[in-house]
Image (cartoon, rainbow, N blue to C red):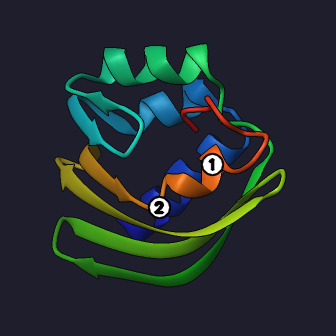
Amino acid sequence: MKEKVLEFLACFCNGDVDSLSALLAEEFCFKGPFIECTSKEAYISALNEDPPIDCQIEVVKLFEDGEDVGIFYTFKKSDVTTPMAQFFKFNEGKIAETLLVFDSGVFASSKEIGSKL
């Protein structure tokens, strides 16, 4: 499961929405500071509207417990660098839900304002 989380984040940072989509369960749920989605279709639509490109992630800690994976990382995009934590829950090998936590205020003080990630 850890490998799929790293693949998810790599796809996210590269703007590879099609490959990212293949990792998600149809009933995928996402909750984060800027958006909440209750379906794979809604999440992919949000990513297509505001593509997550040109970012980098440096893993601080990655851990797995059964079908749950947690990751702490440093997120970098343009002039923003901030710690983030993300929890992934898997179902039958697909990412079924994720919770993303970070200080959204760092984006308001940068030129990235308005970006949903």
Q: In the rendered image, which quarter contains the N terminus?
A: bottom left
Is the Cβ of the residue at disc 1 closer than 8 Å to that at disc 2?
no
The residue at 28%/42% (across/down) is 31
Q: Which mark is residue 55?
A: none
The residue at 74%/48% (across/down) is 110
Position of residue 42 relative to residue 3, above or below, is: above
Position of residue 2 relative to residue 53, above or below, is: below
Percent from the top left, x then y, of residue 108?
Answer: 62, 45
The residue at 44%/61% (across/down) is 102
Q: What type is the residue that disc 1 sits on?
A: Phe
Q: CA distance from mark 1 to mark 2?
A: 8 Å
Position of residue 73 relative to residue 88, above or below, is: below
Q: Which mark is residue 107?
A: 1
Taking depth in this image into account, of 45 and 105 the one nearest to the observer is 105
Q: Residues within 10 Å of mark 1 (few under 14, many from 20)?
A: some
Classify mark 2: helix, strand or loop.
Answer: loop
**81 relative to 101 in the view: left or right:** right
Classify mark 1: helix, strand or loop.
Answer: helix
The residue at 68%/46% (across/down) is 13
Percent from the top left, x then y, of residue 19?
Answer: 57, 32
Percent from the top left, x then y, of residue 69?
Answer: 30, 69
Q: Residues within 10 Å of mark 2 (few under 14, many from 20)?
A: few
Q: Which residue is mark 2?
A: 103
Q: In the rendered image, which quarter contains the C terminus?
A: top right
Percent from the top left, x then y, of residue 100?
Answer: 36, 55
Q: Name which quarter of the figure residue 80 lies in.
A: bottom right
Q: What type is the residue that disc 2 sits on?
A: Asp
Taking depth in this image into account, of 92 and 20 the one nearest to the observer is 20
Residue reaching furthest front?
109
